[in-house]
Structures are given as structure tokens and as C-alpha cells.
Amino acid sequence: MDQIRGFRFLGQAETCRVLLLMTLVVAFILGLQYFELTPISTGTLGNGTVPGFIESNNITKSDENEMFLAPQEATSEFRPGNSTTEVLKSYEHKFVNNSPKAYGQSRGNETASPHHPLQPKKHESSTKKPPLVVISITQMNNMLVKRHSGPNNSLAPRWGSNVDKELRDARNKIKNAALVKKDDTLYAPLYHNLSIFKRSYELMEQTLKVYIYSDGDRPIFHQPEAIMEGVYASEGWFMKLMETSHRFLTKDPTKAHLFYLAFSSRILQQKLYVRDSHSRRNLVKYLRDYIDLIVSSYPFWNRTRGSDHFFTACHDWAPAETRGPYMNCIRSLCNADVGIDFVVGKDVSLPETKISAAQNPNGNVGGNRPSKRTILAFFAGNMHGYVRPILLNHWSSSPEPDMKIFNRINHKSYIRFMKQSRFCVCAKGYEVNSPRVVESVLYGCVPVIISDNFVPPFLEVLDWESFAVFVSEKEIPNLRKILISIPLRRYVEMHKRVLKVQKHFMWHDGEPVRYDMFHMILHSVWYNRVFQTF
């Protein structure tokens, strides 16, 4: 009898062992699906065989965060001494990154509904958790300076070129820029250093040449007219103006300082994502196949391992879809989250602009003067993410009449409130970015950014704290106290600076205008490239 019991016990133990192994295998497969870390095997495209980019499947998002997602591919031969890591190590840097925005959902028009404040649905507020460490704007600026001053943070080209010398000469001229005390076009208090910005911008106009690969199938590549409206329109507008630029384009790639990959992350999602599949593997593969094609057809990617290539992408998924070989590129992203994928000093924060009509991309710019702005703070929008429900719960039923915090409202009322408010709250949704930052500036409302670890656009040159207010997510209950503590004289000066900075956040159809949005995005790419060429 004891022997039979023994055999029965061994059989039960073996069954449990098999079940445990099966559970581990399933969990491993699901983990790969979630992180999209499928390795790229050697493939043949065009006329040649391309060595595959190898990506380690055991690198978690937290590990990547601690290295600020510096390129880890075997082909890059690059192990950066990233100065950003030094800042984070002292905080035992770890970030929580749970489920991303619901697959296949589009933000659409957040102000098109006449609904008034409502409690958000439970599932809408549980998509992410706050980061455990918050990086301040001051720290971001320090990261930028350290990265641009260290040759170990850049990729040395595999063979030399005249363009490298031109970029080094430009860097030396920028560093030794003549002092500019006053400028008729640029308002000095807006910038970290007006002299450096002005000299860098002038050298960009005089020197920069961009080559655009003709490869890539429409509409994902080379079709800006497909994405000229909506919250992802920055992709289309930049692509259109870049591909028609007379000043910056060159047909000779040997003379190019930068190479533009002209694709739309939004159209990629629309055309290739299989609804409810909960997998973006085919999107990732499509972009990596494109790089394989470029590598096999041209020598330019191989010369710098992609560090002189750039793209603009405004969809929330773009950071995850452009890992692997794209990590060497200068990635211009709307979802510019320093706590996850964004590398300060290499990547560029792309302004998210919500365009209702392509014929009038900037809308009805302007608003009331300070004395006629009777509302202290305003916010309205969908209850995306975890921050907005907290904001609404604290302030939508507030007895303070100068705090106008709503759920969705109609577009006409939305604009009217912005033009009547002193401060416009730009609270993160599913991700750190929001079109409200640009909207606030265009309507003359001082932006109040509540989005931990969001890298604001044009950080390379703009002193954001001179015309915007940054409130950490945990300080939402103290929002009104923070805003009323700002002296009236200080607010009036901030409002003045918001009006002065508007020129940098405007699109112009046809021929771009100096210092406008197109030129500022391109300048950020140029500036980061110049200061990473050693």
C-alpha cells in the first residue's frame, strides 16, 4: 500500500512539474509579445545580404531606462558613458511601466463632445502608474549639457567624410559665438543662451544639407497629405515642408549632414495594425525591414551606424516601434518621455499640434490681454490615463469659481476658455505628450504642464521655466495654491514671453518662415547632431 501511495505521489509531482513548465513557457512568450523584443535575423533584401541587428531578449524596460535606452545592438559597437545615467544612479532609478494605451485606440478629437464634468470610467484611469523617480527640467538641462560635452556619448564614424569636418567647424563656431545683447526678432529671456542659439541657427541655414531616401512605399512613406490634420499632424507638416525644401535638400548624399527617413508612424498604425490583435510585431518588422533595405542599398547608414539619420513620429507607439537599429538615430518624438525611451541630447521632442483644418494650421491665434483673463486655471479633455481623473476628482467640484476643470466640452467653448484663462493645464493622457502645450501658447495662455518626465519641445534652446509652470503630478491637490502664489508682475511677464515664443510653434504652408515650427524642429535635430560629432 505504501508503495502504491509513493507511486501516486510521484505521479502527482510530475504532473505539477509539467504544468509549471508550461506556465513558464506561456509567460515567457507573452512577455516577448508585450515588449516586442523579437530578434532580427540575417535577411536578404535588394542586392545584398544584411547582417541582422541583434537585440537581447533579456533586457527589460527598467534596464533600458537606467541606461536611457542607449543603443545596445551588437552592430553598433557603442557602449556609451551616458551622463544621464549618473543623475539617475543616485536615485536608484527605476520606472514603472505597466500596460500601454489600449491597442488600436485613437485619441481623436478630445473637445468635440458637449459633455460636462463626469466621473471617469474605472478602466480609463488604470492604464499606467506614476514613475518612481521624477526628473526635473533643471536635471534635463544638465543632462543635455553633459551629453553634448562628452565625446564618449557619440558614435565615431567608421570612415571619415568632409561633412564631419564641417560639423566640427560648426560646433567650434557655435561655442565661440559673439555675444548678442539684443535682437530685433528674438526675445533674449526666452532662451538659455541667445548668442549660441542665433549663431547655431545661422550656421544651420548656411551649412545644413539633408538627403531623403526615395525608398519606401506610399502611403506610409512620402505621403504627407495623408496626415495633415488631427493630433498627429506634426508628422505630415514636417514631411511636406522637408521634402519640398529648396534650402536644405541635396540630391548628393555624400554632401548630406543628415538623412531623413520620411515615414508616418500614424499611417503605419492605421495600415498595418490588426485590430484587437494586441501585437505590433508586424509594425516593428516593417520598419526594420526598411532599415535592412537602406543598409543593403547604400553605404551611409553603415558609415555612422545611423547616428546621422533622423525621423519624426507622433504616434504614442513610436518609441517602442523604433527600438533596435533605430536607437542610434536622432528620434524626433511627440511621446518624449525621459523615463522610458527618450535620450536627452540625442533625441528631439516633437511638438504635438492638433490641426482642425489644413488650410489654417494655427487656428485663431491670440486671446485676451492679462487684465481680461478672469479665469485662473482651465482644463478640459477626455479622462485618458491616470493623471486627468485625479485632476478632475480634486477640482471639478471645487468651490473656487476661478478653477475651471472639466471633462470633455465642445470645441468652441474650449477655445473660449483658453483665451480667457491665465493658466492652461496641460495634463498628460495615456502618454506624457499633449497638444495643449502648443494650444496654450497660441492662445496666449501660460502652460501649466502636469506630466512627470515630459521633455518639452526645443529644450536645446528654450528656457521653458521662464514662460511655463511645471507642477509634479503629486502636487495636483496644491495646484491652486501654486498658481495664486505667482505674483501678478511675474504672471504678466510670463504672458508676454508666451506671446513672444508663439512664432516657434506655428506652421506655415508653402514656404516656411524663419524660426517657425519647421525650422525649430530641424534646428533641434541639427544642434544635437553637431554636438555629437567628435
Image: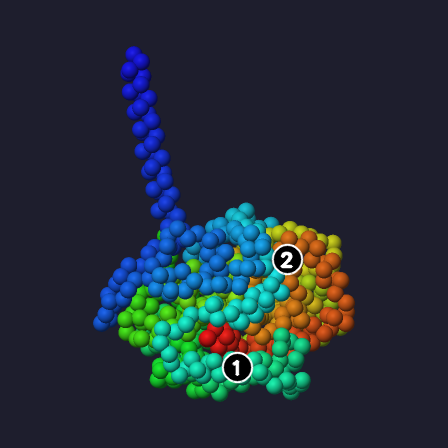
Dot 1 amino acid type: Asn
Nearer the observer, 523 or 529: 529
Kindly report the distance in space between the C-alpha atoms of the residues bearing marks 2 and 1. 37 Å
Inspect this view and state whether residue 363 appears.
Answer: no
Query: Which residue lies under the disc numbered 2?
Result: 472
Q: Earlier in the sequence, mark 2 or mark 1?
A: 1
| The N terminus lies in quadrant | top left
Residue 264: percent from the left, percent from the top?
41, 69
* Comparing labels 2 and 1, the label whose residue is closer to the camera: 1
Inspect this view and state whether residue 82 appears.
Answer: yes
Dot 2 amino acid type: Ser
Which residue occupies 34% across, 37% down?
A: 21
Mark 2 crowdedness (10 Å alpha carbons): few <14, some 14-19, many ≥20: some
Which residue occupies 58% across, 83% down?
A: 176
Q: Looking at the image, which residue sits at the far left? A: 47
User: What is the secondary structure assignment of the residue under circle 1?
Assistant: helix
| Numbered label tally | 2
Compared across the picture, whether 458 is left or right of 302 comes to right
Residue 27 drawn above or below residue 531: above
Q: Quadrant of residue 365?
A: bottom right
User: What is the secondary structure assignment of the residue under circle 2?
Assistant: loop
Residue 6 drawn above or below residue 74: above
Query: Which residue lies under the disc numbered 1?
Result: 172
Compared across the picture, whether 5 is left or right of 170 comes to left
Mark 1 crowdedness (10 Å alpha carbons): few <14, some 14-19, many ≥20: few
Q: Quadrant of residue 289?
A: bottom left
Q: Looking at the image, which residue sits at the far top? A: 1
Which residue occupies 54% across, 47% down?
A: 122
Residue 392: percent from the left, percent from the top?
63, 54
